[in-house]
Image (cartoon, rainbow, N blue to C red):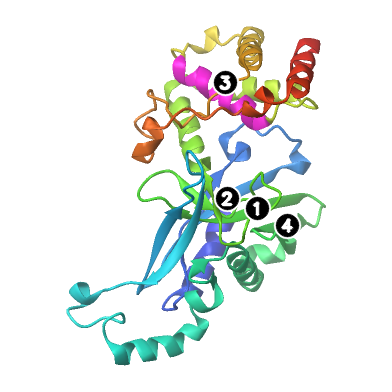
């Protein structure tokens, strides 16, 4: 899957070179399918890939965090012209009136004109633009002869690529676009949020790349094999049909892995380990608290690069909704006890 998307992006990068449109970077596989524990049946797996974007020449992306949230999880991405006088040793577009007029003529097919709303990068416009690019570029790939292809939007914020072989097997790829926060592993992406309505100029904070790096870090600490992921996979199936989401389960598992010495494979007895995970989950439900893995966590692996304010932030409780909803809390506890 990753190689196929890399080939697709290579075609897109060539077509977008020397334009005033976003520069697409290599895709990053994220989510449970790439982490190695996908809780869904093979026929229903959606492979999620994040495609980072950088501004084209002469532009800069400025991240404006939502100040009403603590910690801020939403962001608007302002697009501005960039001063390049020093680098080019001549007046740039910002400071040369004649150049600016010529630039504005070209801009009719540029970033500000077709992908922004009031100078802010518009998620839905970017998704539609990217979807059109994928449709046009796919036919240029050798793989196009092997699959029947359907390119659709996913909640108007990302691109869903459905590839069906002649034998009937289908691959579902969700391509999300994002902008990196500095040089960290945190991105603002076009992923769909939990809110029923998200303004089109709002980009959601994504921890998916950092989570993928964490699982890679753990894999290097453990003996050969993926026994720990098999335990997570088994737990996800045990909890299927309950109110406990796969993300809450994954967060519980990450806390356990991060705070527990790495055992040898023989010590990873399946039943014991699964019981340990469910027991810890039960304690979290009783307290109505499991903290987000990346906020206020003082024992983060050094390979994972987070913005400085993450470590100093107050912990973010993923079960806060249960504090204000006794009926939902009682139902979740009852479901776990029945297992």
Q: Nearer the viewer, residue 132 or 335?
A: 335
Q: Quadrant of the C terminus?
A: top right
The residue pinned by badge 2 equals 49
> Dot 2 lies on which element?
strand
The residue pinned by badge 3 equals 228
Look at the picture and state if 291 lies above or below 14: above
What is the crowding at mark 4: few (fewer than 14 residues within 10 Å), some, or many (at least 20)? many
Give the residue drawn at x 65%, y 23%. 323
Any magenta on residue 250?
Answer: yes
Q: Nearer the viewer, residue 84 or 330?
A: 330
Q: Nearer the viewer, mark 2 or mark 4?
A: 2
The answer to whether mark 1 and mark 2 are in CB contact below 8 A is yes
> Dot 3 lies on which element?
helix
Q: CA distance from mark 3 to mark 2?
A: 23 Å
Position of residue 199 in the picture relative to residue 59 (left or right): right
Q: CA distance from mark 1 to mark 2?
A: 6 Å
- Which mark sits nearer the N-terminus, 1 or 2? 2
Any magenta on residue 220?
Answer: no
Position of residue 26 in the picture relative to residue 287 (left or right): left
Q: Nearer the viewer, residue 91 or 209?
A: 91
Look at the picture and state if 132 lies above or below 167: below
> Which mark is drawn over residue 174?
1
- Which mark sits nearer the N-terminus, 1 or 4? 4
Q: CA distance from mark 3 to mark 1?
A: 26 Å
The answer to whether mark 3 and mark 1 are in CB contact below 8 A is no
Residue 197 x %, y %: 68, 53
- Looking at the rendering, the stretch of residues picked out in magenta corresponds to 246-259
Residue 113 x %, y %: 52, 79
Give the residue drawn at x 44%, y 64%. 78
> Which mark is drawn over residue 163?
4
């Amino acid at each position: 899957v990753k190689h196929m998307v890399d080939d697709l992006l290579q075609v897109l990068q060539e077509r977008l070179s020397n334009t005033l449109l976003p520069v697409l970077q290599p895709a990053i596989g994220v989510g449970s399918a790439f982490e190695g524990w996908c809780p869904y049946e093979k026929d229903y797996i959606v492979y999620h890939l994040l495609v980072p974007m950088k501004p084209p020449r002469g532009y800069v992306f400025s991240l404006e965090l939502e100040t009403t949230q603590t910690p801020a999880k939403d962001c608007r991405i302002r697009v501005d012209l960039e001063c390049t006088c020093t680098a080019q040793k001549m007046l740039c577009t910002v400071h040369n009136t004649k150049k600016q007029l010529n630039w504005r003529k070209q801009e009719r097919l540029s970033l500000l004109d077709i992908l922004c709303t009031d100078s802010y990068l518009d998620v839905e416009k970017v998704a539609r633009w990217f979807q059109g690019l994928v449709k046009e570029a796919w036919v240029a790939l050798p793989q196009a002869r092997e699959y029947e292809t359907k390119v659709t939007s996913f909640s108007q914020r990302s691109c869903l690529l459905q590839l069906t072989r002649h034998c009937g097997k289908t691959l579902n790829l969700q391509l999300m676009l994002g902008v990196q926060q500095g040089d960290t592993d945190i991105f603002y992406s076009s992923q769909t949020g939990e809110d029923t309505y998200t303004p089109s100029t709002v980009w959601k904070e994504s921890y998916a790349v950092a989570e993928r790096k964490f699982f890679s870090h753990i894999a290097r600490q453990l003996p050969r094999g993926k026994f720990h992921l098999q335990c997570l996979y088994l737990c996800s199936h045990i909890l299927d049909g309950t109110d406990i989401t796969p993300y809450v389960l994954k967060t519980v598992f990450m806390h356990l892995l991060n705070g527990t010495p790495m055992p040898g494979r023989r010590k990873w007895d399946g039943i014991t380990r699964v019981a340990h995970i469910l027991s810890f989950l039960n304690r979290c439900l009783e307290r109505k608290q499991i903290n987000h893995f990346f906020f206020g966590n003082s024992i983060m692996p050094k390979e994972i690069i987070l913005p400085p304010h993450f470590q100093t932030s107050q912990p973010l409780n993923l079960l806060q909704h249960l504090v204000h909803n006794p009926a939902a809390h009682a139902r979740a506890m009852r479901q776990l006890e029945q297992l």
